[in-house]
Amino acid sequence: MSHHNLAAPMQGRQRFWSPGALVLAAMALVGLAFVVARYGGGLGAVTNLSQANPWGLWIGVDVASGVALAAGGFTTAALAHIFGRHAYEPVTRPALLTALLGYVFVTLALLVDIGRSWAIWKPMFFWNPNSVLFEVAMCVMVYSAVLHIEFIPIVAERLGGVIKPLQWLNHRLDKVMWFFIILGVVLSCMHQSGLGSLMLIAPTKVHPLWYTPLLPLLFLLSAIAVGFPMVVVEHFIAGKSFALADESPLLSRLVRITILLLGLYGAVKLGDLGARGAWAYLGEGSTQARAFIVEMLFGVLIPWVMLLVPNLRQRRTTLFIASFLIVAGVVLNRINVFLVSFRPPFPEQSYFPSLGEMAITLGFIAALMLAYRFTVYFLPVLTPADKEAAS
Amino acid sequence: MKLDRRNFLRLAGAAGATAVVGRGAEAQARQYQPPPQALGCLVDLSLCIGCRKCEQACNEVNQLPAPERPFDDPTVLERKRRPDDKAFTVINRHYAGRRDDKNQPLPTFVKTQCMHCQDPACVSACIVGALTKKPNGAVHYDEGKCIGCRYCMVACPFQIPAYEYSDPLTPRVRKCTFCFERISQTGGKPGCALACPVEAITFGRRQDLLGLARKRMEDNPGRYEPHIYGEREAGGTSWLYLSSQPFARLGFQTLPDQPMPHLTETIQHGVFAYLWAPLTLFGILGGVMALLGRRNDKEERP
Ligand code: SF4
Ligand code: SF4
Ligand code: SF4
């Protein structure tokens, strides 16, 4: 797509089964064992879900956080292809891959979570346009398809020589790719905010620290804000196991935009808290109050200040720490909105995820990282150090 | 990547036009009409003697599994229960301050089941429309559509839908059916209402039941709390309650009058009316892309 593209497969540069990859495989297998148990004994056999708490860790982390953290895919695409900042193209490919794998795993997690996995196709035929969940599901489905289309050029670059129809398809796509890129951004905005509307149906159950009509806007703003930090975190993790071109200068320029985006999110969130007078709940000493403070302090304010200081932003470690905090902050926000804030009127016992739920969540994360490793091993996604040196 | 300018302009134009049309729809508030002929039940807690005959009848008409302890075992009432996947209705005993002439505390019994809301959160939430509000007032569950997402359980303000968590492949959402099949036939009554030996449960048209409740309050001054629970709660429910004790002391929640789906549906339909918002965004992004996205493009394409 551009002369900046130096991406190449990692194959031949490194071995696939590093000790880390073996650990990931082991984690994925443990998760798989619990998935088998779930299909043996039902959701009740492996989860702590109850009649009072029908949604748990999988919805909060695997689904809601998964979708939020995949936002790097559409934010980098918008930056590089729509706003014409072509300098950032080296980061669009890994971000696209993360988004693609993210949505694949969100779907897999949903499959395990819904009671009737085999019925997952039904929303395509039985529509309830009043349902927020229906809207989210439709957008996620179409967006997943769009991500696959956006990924075709990367596959074609490697395999187009061997598989001729792929080459042909890629040429065709080239002319209309602009449509899919814009469509991807639009669909993302729709379902990222839609996810935020989900809990608005339960005004009496969601803690007032989080319950606000602005939830959809806050979800959208936080997803946009977490996009670039997620790209940074991912680059550093990938760089731990592959010899990659050092993109830190590019990344620290990228996160300057995050200062604005995260600042906007934080300002709207705090402004909303003040306007609703909900800040009074911060003093009630509850789990919810503490969770809210941790979310805002470590997930928004501290990393925002860190990014603001040029010295911290430009140093590799502090750039990583700040980005990591933002990512963790958004995950905590999703956990807070879907789980911590949820107070059923007739609680049986308070919900805490079971070992099985955690094992499956960790298993999915491990499997996702392995799939990422596998893909960058065989397809040109990342820019290896030797390529950069040669250019 | 090529942005075909002609195509783009056409799209952007369509988006702009739609945006203008959409504005009107966006401003419109949500219009929802609960079924005018809704049936309901009036539960008069001052009459209920806690015999649990309604529980037994419900168990029989819905072919539910036999309970762990028999329906005439009084020890069941020692702890508070909720309806679940094996029991669609339960009776709980509350000591809410009533005393007999020897100053011994007197119990008040409360029947709990699906309220069959007039504007139900569960129906609005269900991703596939497996839950529907029928013209006769019943909130009906269609197992054939359900995917098991449990969003209905998240949404219900009364915490009613229960799930069959131990079924690995075909779990169902379970809740009081309002004996839909029975009440759809002329003269049919819900199992529980029919079984009640003291007629604490009156079945009829919701409108009439509201009248009946008011009449009972007028005819028996001082006997009842001046509140018909369910008249307005969460937008109104088909099941209604009269009580001689304050509802708050009997495990009833104080709920807003506004129907639960109001906010979500207003946002949803505001944003998606004629797809004006997504199309506008598409148009704007397309415009930006046409202006900025292709700069340096010539250098980039060898
Ligand atoms: S009580 Fe709950 S389950 Fe019953 S109709 Fe109302 S929202 Fe639906
Ligand atoms: S669990 Fe079934 S009935 Fe409940 S919202 Fe999901 S699809 Fe609808
Ligand atoms: S109406 Fe029917 S399903 Fe509902 S509690 Fe009464 S007997 Fe049970």
Image: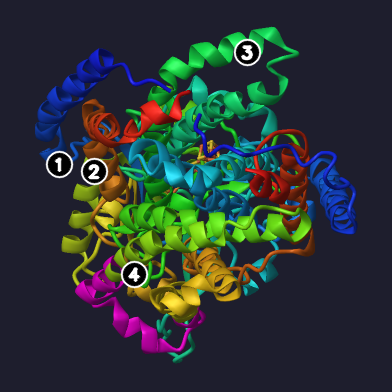
Q: Give the residue pinned by disc 4.
A: A266
Q: Is ligand 2 less than 8 Å from the beta carbon at label 3?
A: no
Q: Is residue A279 magenta-colored?
A: yes
Q: Amino acid at mark 1?
A: Ala
* Residue B44 shows in this picture: no
Q: Kindly state the secondary structure of the residue where label 1 is placed.
A: loop
Q: Residues within 10 Å of mark 4 (few under 14, many from 20)?
A: many
Residue under the image location 53 percent in, 67 percent down: A323
* Residue A363 shows in this picture: yes
Q: Is residue A270 magenta-colored?
A: yes
Corner quadrant of residue A155? top right
- The magenta segment is A268-291
Give the answer, above or below, for where B146 lies relative to A272. Answer: above
Query: Are the two marked residues, 3 and 1, in contact with CB atoms closer than 8 angstroms?
Result: no
Query: Are the two marked residues, 1 and 2, in contact with CB atoms closer than 8 angstroms?
Result: yes
Camera-side mark, 1 or 4 = 4
Query: Are the two marked residues, 1 and 4, in contact with CB atoms closer than 8 angstroms?
Result: no
Q: CA distance from mark 2 to mark 3?
A: 46 Å
Q: Chain of mark 4?
A: A
Q: Residues within 10 Å of mark 1 (few under 14, many from 20)?
A: some
Q: Give the residue pinned by disc 3.
A: A167
Q: Percent from the top left, x then y, of residue A306?
A: 45, 78
Q: Between disc 1 and disc 2, whose residue precedes?
A: 1
Q: Give the residue pinned by disc 1.
A: B29
Q: Percent from the top left, x then y, of residue A42?
A: 77, 45
Q: CA distance from mark 3 to mark 1?
A: 51 Å
Q: Judge from the rendering whether residue B13 lies leftward or rightward of residue B134; answer left or right.
A: left
Q: CA distance from mark 1 to mark 4?
A: 30 Å
Q: Residues within 10 Å of mark 3 (few under 14, many from 20)?
A: many
Q: Give the residue pinned by disc 2.
A: B266
